[in-house]
Structure formats: C-alpha cells, structure tokens
Amino acid sequence: MKKLKYIFIATLFLAASCSNFEEINTNPDKSTTAKPDMLASNTLVKTFKLSNSSPDVYVQITVFNHHVTKLGSSPEPGQYYWSYYPYGSFGNYKYLTDLKDMIKFSDGSVSQSSYQGLALFLKAWYGFSATLDMGDIPYSEAGMAEDGITKPIYDKQADVFQYILDDLKQAEAYFAEGATLGGDIMYGGNADKWRKLCNAMQLKVIQTMSKKVTPDQKARFAAIVNGGHLMSSYDDDFKLVYTENVNATFPFFNANNQRLDQAPSTLAVETLKNNNDYRLFYFADPAQAEIDGGLTESDFDAYVGAPYELDPNTLSINGDNGMYSLVNIRYTQFRDNDPLLYFTYAEQCFIIAEAIEEGWVTGNAQEYYENGVKAQLSYYMNLPHTAGLVHGMEITQSYIDNYFTGEAAYKTSGTKQDRLKQILTQRWLIDFFQPNSSYYPQFLRTGYPQYILNPATNLNEDNSTVFPKRWKYPTSELTTNPENYQKAIDSQYNGVDNTMGLPWYLQ
C-alpha cells in the first residue's frame, strides 16, 4: 500500500537490492528492445523501493502505528492522524501499462505464465491499497487508456474486493505452472514463493472485509487454509533486502543525528515489557536518564517509551534530557541492515489464528499464534549484525522455547476478545520500523491496538475528536474524471469527500 507510506507515515528512503543493482535500475524506455525481465524488475523497484533524495531528509517510518515517535520540534503529521498529503492516490496505476508490455514481450517464452501472474498480483496489490485509502475506486477499467478508456468508472468497493480476490486466485494459478520469474528482486525468480504469497494475500483481503464477508468468501478462506499451499516459515517472507553495495544501502546507515530524534512509543515499549519480549533490546537503546540513575542496559525498566499523543515540543524538551529510549543504534551501523517486510509468514499465522477464533475455519488458534510469534523471534535471532548491540539480551532458541509464559501465554481460559487482542497485538509488532501499515486492515476494523487519541494534538482537520476513516480522492480526479468522481462521492459519502466518510468495508 504505497500511498499509506506517504499518508500515515513519513517514509524512510532506501535502495532496492539484488545481485545486479544496475540491471534492475535500467530504464527499459532507453533500450531499443524492452525485455520482460527488465520491465518486471523496474516495476518491482518502483513499487517496493521507498526513496528520498538524501539521508539529511530522513523522516521516520510507521509513526502512524506508533512504533516510533519523533522527538524533534516539528510535528510528524502521521503521528497525529494527518499528513502533508491528505489524499489517496492512483499513482501506482501508471505501472499497469508497463505490466501489459511485460506480458506482451514475454509471449511464447517459458516464463510467460509467471509474468502474467506478476501482473495480476501487482494490480491486486495496487487496488487493495487504493480501495482501503478511499473506498470505491476504478479497478475493472484501470490501466486501459491505450484501449480508449481515459475516464474509468469507479467500481463499488464490494466489487473491488471481489475483483482483487479473483485476480489473486488467477495469479496463483499462473505461478503454479512453475516458470522462473526473470527480473524478480523480491523472491529471486521463485514462482512457488509467489504462489504462496498469492494465497496468503487472499486470506488477508478476505479478513480485511470481515464485517461484510459472505459465506462463499469464508468458504474460500477455509479452502485456502486447508489446501496447504501457504507460507511455511519466515524464509517465505515477502521482503526487500539490503546489501553492502553502496547503491543498495540501508538508508539509516551512518544517520546517528537523525536517530537522536527517534524513540519507540509507550505503546510499543510497554507491550514488549509486558511480554518479557527481548525484541525490545533489538528495537531500542535504554533511556540515558535511567542508566544514569543506576539501571543497566539489560534491565527492562531502563527502557522508556515516548508518549506519542503529547505535543511534539514537550517531547523535544524531555527527549533532550534523556528521559526516553531512542531507536537502537544498530540501525545506523550497517549497509545491509534489516530488510523491508511487506508480508510475512508470521502475519499469515495471525490471520489464521483470528479466523479460527471467529469460527471461519477449524484448527488450533493457539498453535498458529505461537508459530507466528516464534517465526518473528527466530527472524530476529538470525539477523546479522546484532552481536554486541542488543544489550546482552540476545534471542536464543532456548528463550523462544520458553517465551509463552505470563502475559505472552495464550489466554485459553480468557475470553475470545482477550485472545484476539493478543493475536492482533503480536501482528502489529511485526511492523516496528517497517513500511507496512496495520491502520486499515487491523486498527479501524478491530480497534486493536488501542491507540490513544488526544484532540489537542490530533491533526485530523475534519474532526479532531475521532480517527480518520479514509483519505480524500486525488484532486486531479476533479478535472480528469469529474463525472465518475462525483458519482462515487454521492453514492458513498452523501456528496462530501472528507476523512469521516465510512467506507463499505467498515460499515
């Protein structure tokens, strides 16, 4: 959901990585012959690489999820439920033309089916982001300007969800033919991993529309779970990897000055503390004031989150006094630091655990919950460049095996809501210092995690006492597609295009 990264979060820039960075950045428009692998890699780079022009303009990521809180004197709009750009976007749709060309140039090749699968997957990815941003959107007629459709209709959100599911299902069938995908910077050409991702994404889409889900869609969810061709470990995670190549460097590398403005939030820190979760020591450094007071860096109590709902000027004053923890200095030390995680095996586990608790599918919710947590803990245990930088609190296999005690133990004797809160909180923790946003598919849908809203600092200009439910349509639609735009506004939001209209999937 690329636009979310500009709307709800300020983005962290980075360079995409693969074995040949120059190749993936080759502009096919400058070549006399466009190759499908070049179009594939170029589109993947543009879709999943977040970039700014310089480390000097670094701004934090995932503030809207309250993973990280800015301590500087200027407010981060995403932290306060607003944005510099309070509009949705159809920007990624411009890549649909490249994807059509990719398929055309792959005609007759052994990899044609995988290119067809990639095109459908990416259209579904773009559409899912856009519909959660805004509501009804063009989808069935999107990317058809070359066919003479320059003013596409806005499909109803219910139809958009179904189109997305159908495209993901067909994409999975294409990838099931097993052809290697050339130009693949995400999975190295492995069609089977793409196939698993297509199945997992169907689960996410169906669950996101849980308030409106039909019996047929629930049955489809169960069939995918029972079919077995899903992600099986964190090795299947959909991620963008950094390398030591200067052109593919983790953007927070050598950015210690920017780090001094970043703190984990109270919600993140207290959640990790309550679960005795060693990820705290991977995410954060201790608060200097607590160390000066005699605590050690391996003491949970030495870590203090910043209250994200306070005025940023207050946070700046207190932050300068060392009252709060900062993000771990390890994020600044290595070019090949943590990958960007766009969809994980752990999230798949939590999606299924929630579905079991809701009665959509039979199974052991506790097992899925524990497998999801174990996967994320194992992921951090096996990250490079953590030795000596996690405050003597390394995640080990023994620690993982004994994690599920106290608050972290699955609440089998509690209420369903107790268990759903556990599942959804662990799902939210995946996104610490990551580009994904759980705001739409999780928070607005379920209320978890339980964010604090302070009307005095809430920047939602339409209503400072509530969380925004959507973003406005791009202003360009007023001139390029005004008739269909107005029909969409009238039919959904009584003619008012603002953040308070309730999209179909939340009704």
Image (spheres, rainbow, N blue to C red):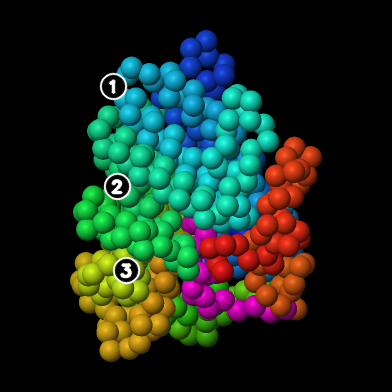
Q: Which mark is residue 196?
A: 2
Structural distance between the alpha carbons of marks 1 and 3: 39 Å
* Amino acid of disc 3: Trp
Q: Quadrant of residue 192?
A: top left
Structural distance between the alpha carbons of marks 2 and 3: 20 Å
Up/down of 473 relative to 466, above or below = above
Q: Which mark is residue 360?
A: 3
Name the residue located 60 percent from the left edge and 79 percent from the top edge: 452
Q: Label 1 neighbourhood size at 10 Å, few (<14), some (14-19), many (20+)?
A: few
Q: Earlier in the sequence, mark 2 or mark 3?
A: 2
Name the residue located 76 percent from the left edge and 43 percent from the top edge: 482
* Amino acid of disc 2: Lys
Name the residue located 47 percent from the left edge and 36 percent from the top edge: 44
- Check contact, mark 2 vs mark 3: CB within 8 A: no
* Amino acid of disc 1: Val
Q: Please say whether residue 341 is visible from this viewpoint.
A: no
Which mark is in front, 1 or 3? 3
Q: Earlier in the sequence, mark 1 or mark 3?
A: 1
Q: Which residues are magenta?
A: 434-455
SS at circle 1: loop
The quadrant of the picture occupied by the C terminus is bottom right
User: Going by the image, does 194 lie left or right of 154?
Assistant: left
SS at circle 2: helix
